[in-house]
Amino acid sequence: MQKDVRISPAYIEAERICKHLFSPGSGQIIDAADLHVAPNGKSAVFSGMMVEKLEGSPPTRLCQVDLISGELKVLTFGPRTDRLPKYAPHGRHIAFLSDRDVPGTFQLYLLDSAKSAASAAPAVDGSVEYLDWSPDSSSILLGVAGHGADRPSTQGAIQSQTERSGEPAWLPTVATEDESSRWRRIWLYDLRTNSMRQLSRSDINVWEAGWCGNRLIAAVASRAHQKGFGTAPACIFLRWKRGIVARFTRLGTNWVFWRGVAPEATWLSSRRSAVIVACWRETYG
């Protein structure tokens, strides 16, 4: 019985085809995701997948395409994975996420659009899942999952690893329902002061959030870190300067995910049988 499949004719042929298609180590972009168009409409940034070797998951790099000429340019070079680039509304900065310091733990980075120089923002306690610029480009809202939180279904829906310093890898862990490391919070990064702070309360699990103008944040949240456990999810509104819940609208148990906030900040939507939750400027602005 042949134990090593890598010496079989079928494997050798498959490897030859993959090398031809993906050109490992060549820097060729084979796939694109997270496309975001610049405010002036002349360029766009995206997460470009590049295969360095055929083993393991290929990393992504920040790439930019000129929408007039079609010219492609790689903006970052890792190490590991850079993803989810977004232009600031004023167009001078690009925010993105990277796990270049700790594998699997994504933090916020900023890229100067003119100089293509990346710098790290202060680290958060957990891994950043998404980011959202404020309309005036002064702040960035971050969705942060604890190191023990369940990963999204696109990443296997398994529990991420909790950070343990100075402990052997074989040491078992005991999981409980109230572990603080399994909750999702929202954090706020202030560009003017280069400061980071947790915005949501510790007893609220924020599934997704987005800006509603410059002073109000809308979020889908619950009082438990597991879907279907504890109280039903609800839509909450936070005045970010004080972190006060301005309104709490229950969504029920069949909600799916956050859809977005209108640019004019007069309404937001949650995809649950086409239900629209109102956030009126004259009431909360």
Image: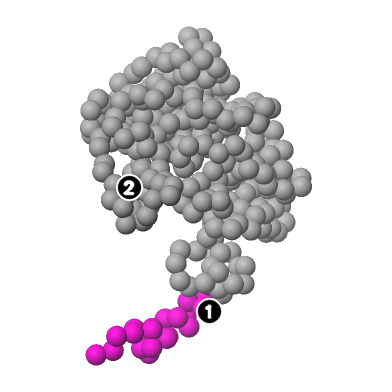
Span of residues in magenta: 1-22
Q: Main secondary structure of the magenta part?
A: helix
Q: Amino acid at mark 1?
A: His
Q: Secondary structure at mark 1?
A: helix
Neighbourhood count class around disc 2 (C-alpha, 10 Å): few under 14, some 14–19, many 20 upward: some
Going 42% across and 81% down the picture, which residue do you hit?
14
* Res 270 seen here: no
Image spot of residue 104 (x, y percent): 46, 51
Going 25% across and 37% down the picture, which residue do you hit?
176
Going 36% across and 29% down the picture, which residue do you hit?
205
Image spot of residue 64 (x, y percent): 66, 53
Image spot of residue 215 (x, y percent): 56, 18
* Res 205 seen here: yes
Q: Which mark is residue 20?
A: 1
Magenta stretch containing residue 5, yes or no? Answer: yes
Quarter of the image where one finds residue 196:
top right
Q: Is residue 51 left or right of residue 27?
A: left
Instruction: Kindly identify which residue carries mark 2.
Output: 159
Q: Vertical placement of 1 versus 142: above or below?
A: below
Image spot of residue 223 (x, y percent): 30, 25
Q: Vertical placement of 196 versus 101: above or below?
A: above
User: 54 and 166: which one is in front?
Assistant: 166
User: 60 and 242: which one is in front?
Assistant: 242
Q: Foreground mark, 1 or 2?
A: 2
Q: Secondary structure at mark 2?
A: loop
Label 1 and label 2: CA atoms lie apart by 36 Å
Q: Which mark is residue 220?
A: none
Q: Amino acid at mark 2?
A: Gln
**Which residue sits furthest right?**
115
Q: Is residue 114 left or right of residue 135?
A: right
User: 268 and 253: which one is in front?
Assistant: 253
Q: Is residue 177 left or right of residue 91?
A: left
